[in-house]
Image: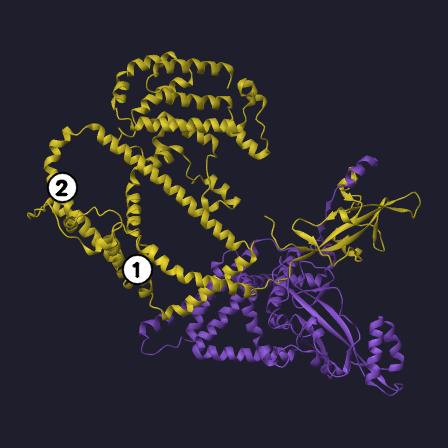
Amino acid sequence: MSEASSSRKGAGKDAVRSYFAEKYNKVLDSILEAEAAISRSPNVAEDLSESSVSGNSDMSRPSVTASSSTTQGISKKELLQQIAGSLLSTSIERLKTAHSPDGSDTLEISENDAYEKQECSECDGPFKCSAHFEQLAESYDDEIDPEPALEPTTSNTEKDPFIDVFLDKLISRLVPEKLPEREHFGSKSTIEHDLDTGRVPVFSATTLGSNFKKLSKKMGAIFELQDSIIRLLTWRNPTGTVTSLIIFTLICFNPMYLVILPIFRFIYGIVVPGYIRKHPLERSIYPLKRNHGSSLLYDVCYEGKNEYSYGQQFFSKSFMDTLESRNQEIDEISELDKRPENTRELKQGMKVLINLRDMQDMTSCTLHVIDAINNFLQKASSFQNEEHSTKRFFAGFLSIVILKVVSPFVNWSYLFSISTWCLLIYMHPRAHPKIIAFFKKEGVEKDNKNLERKKIETHTMIFDEKPEVKYIEIFEIYRKGLLPNDWRFFRFSNRIFDPQDPYRRAQQFPPGVDSLDDIVPPAGWVFDPNFEWKVDDDVDGWVMERGLNLPITGEFLFDPMFKRRRLIHRVIKTATPLS
Amino acid sequence: MDTNPKTKTKSENKKIKAKFIHNHGQKPSLIQITPPMLSSTLFHAYPLLLIFDNALANIMWLSDDKCLPFIYLTSIWLTISFFIPIQTEATSVLPFTSLLRLWLGIISGVFLFSSFMYYIVSLIASLKDTEPPTLDEIVVLLESVLGKLEVLRNELNVWKKLKFSFNGVNEKCSNKRLFSRLFILGTICQIIIMRFISVGAYTRFFVVSTLVYHSTSFQATLRLLWRFILARSFYYLGSKTFTVRDWSSNCLTMEQIITLSQEATIAAPLIEVLPRLLHEKKNDDHIRILRLILSEQKDDFQDQDLQVLEIEVNENQRKWYRDKHWSTKLLPYERQNFSIEIKNADGSSILRNCLSTVKLGEQKLPNSWHWINDNWERTDWVYSDSAWKEIGKYNSLESCTRSRRWKRRLFHL
């Protein structure tokens, strides 16, 4: 980008800023920041791709330095950080405006439509149009538009806000246009084929963003489910826990319940309440004001404050709901006007926020779990610690054999249901410490015994596999002196140093040392201490393998200036693999 | 050529990395050395070689897609079931089940046959379409077939592997012993298996295990299981029960050693030996030995022979983990920490366990036997591999065992 265009952009920036001073100041700032960052480096994507090929991390290219004097010291990393920062701030601003309670934005914009057009005609250059575009786009914000475009790739240019388009364009410049399918990630040959056929979905930040946004609203149900499962497992809802245990037992004994129960749930959880809502049963039940006595199950199992009184538990929640809803229906119409707007908005915002937090927790939890699994797999499979890995292998092998042999003789229904009951009783917050205390007494004695046994039984495995053995070669090169039979030791080299050798052609010394002590084995290998350097007698063999056509005398291979012989040594692969 | 001495001194301090010897180097042109008869025969055998190579690859589970051999395996299983049905109680078998089994057997047999035929037809068709193979291609294929056969032979040669004996002095145990070991163990296993498993199941088990045997996973499993002493003890159980006499847990005492190695004693005229014997001794020993001899032999000892016995005890140690220290504990079925080589009447020798040299030295000697040397002389450690095959004098990654000799001489009048 030239100097002129950047100055024009500056003028455009001023004009737009004065106009949007009030509302879009921050949004604009971040956009302009990003745009400025881009303008400093016009070929970000190209640069990135180039640097990945050539490995050139230097940013100070002549074309870049010409565009702006301030960019001299900016490295690529800083640039990316700036872009990322501005993108983040943009998205935050977007989120704020999307959930801002005052809905007057759109009105104001539509009112000022004419004025804006005037303003726009004044400023020329590319930025005017985008600013223009942004306002249009703002009016199509998600809160107002109940059905945002499902496929932004098609209706992108018309409907979506400017920032989305901008982000999309920016990211599409940074990433390759067509991404290969995950399946073909490993093999290179198929990628090109797929790219040619063009069946590959394009990466779009807009789609991703909108999906996330929609997801964050709709994930509520999933998180509630997750939460209810946790409540069941921690006995915060004891009746629910016992009920689910009974249901699990039923499923264990007859898997058909997996089909029956969802249907049951659908009929009695959704269809029947719907019927009752439409055709209320005329059953007048008067809840008592005070309740006495309490349930055994609740008192035994409930952990924490006993919030519920006895009577309330008898009326199931759904029943209470229907009762309530009947009353509410009447009130609702009258209440709709009274209810302040803000509470709904606040509730909505809060919900989104909670969902986002849960999503964040979930993702970090997932990462933890993945890390733990990876760690375990790596430990088990890498044979870094031979003993551990072998033990794991043996444990796995033994369990396969035992399970296979034992499985026909075990009633798995009983086993699973009883173990689940035991596990959940064990997990009960009040029972847990007691059980642990009970087992600890026995555990201490056992530990002592185990320790004693461990001292004796350390020799259950033996690692006496033969390590890998190979041979290495080194050439002992002699140089011709002045007299015909005067050969002087030149050096030990890993190159044969024949007349075709590139070092010899370049009239340089071959890489070499003067003493055999300076020769090191290849990485991950060690010299066999029970083996000395040995001269290879089979000169024909190694000469033939290399396809050399030079005279051989004894153990030496001659050429007009040098003679050399091959020394071999035995090397053993080290037990510890190189990380 | 750059002969500047400075560059030479610069490179002097450097270390260079040696390169591996690669056996697959450039080979002289085959076309020149292969006779035309052989070439034409090889050319005609090319499709057969390809089929054979593919069959070997399938047996070794070498193809990238591991599912295909598995499907074949299942089909083979079902086909065998067709011929040898699973024996179940007649009452529980529904007619539908047996029909299904028959149908599956036929279908999988047909599938196997047709997939084999299809492969051959497609192979011939593709050979027709493409250019005829060069001699190099044929030779590479031949090498690949040979390599695979070599691997199969190595893996199948259980006999050779099992012949490694850890206890004897000889490197390998005798064929007779191995045969009896396998016979006893095998028979016991067979009886147990046949007791619980039907003939059909046994056949299927046998066929499947042969088909799986050459897969990498199976071989690795065998190796990993061999790491466990439990597995090894099970294998050597046969040998142990056979040779209880040799491996009775009690170690030989000094008295037993002397009686057992009586034949190895060297008789020497006392007149000749005595000066030499006394020459090596210090003053105290000098007098003591003389006194001993005098007390034993009150007459003149002109025509008396002195019996000299050299005892050579091996101290053995084993490395259980590659990076850890040497342990005095050895495998239950091999030579123990201290062992001694006893010569049999027929000239063969056998290793037997004995007490440690310290304990042997402390023990009271039987009548009229006396130590010549005051202490045990010991040699340096000799390192060997897991089967006690000698490697060398230095500890390396290869060595799993080591042993050294303790020598001490006795005399008897």
Residue under pointer 1: A421
Real-space CA distance between mark 1 and mark 2, rounded to the nearest whole angstrom: 37 Å
In this rendering, the answer to whether A552 lies above or below A101 is below
- Amino acid of disc 1: Trp
Residue extending furthest toward the bottom: B299
Q: How crowded is mark 1: few (under 14 residues within 10 Å), some or many (20 or more)?
A: some
In this rendering, the answer to whether B42 lies above or below A20 is below
For the point 77% across and 49% down, the residue is: A517
Taking the image as shown, residue B324 lies to the left or right of residue A184, namely right
Residue under pointer 2: A325
Does the rendering let one see residue B267?
Answer: no
In front here: A389 or B401?
A: B401
Marking on residue B281: none
- Amino acid of disc 2: Ser
In this rendering, the answer to whether A364 lies above or below B23 is above
For the point 26% across and 26% down, the residue is: A101
Task: Give the x, y percent position of residue B364.
Answer: 71, 78
Chain that appears yellow: A
For the point 38% across and 15% down, the residue is: A17
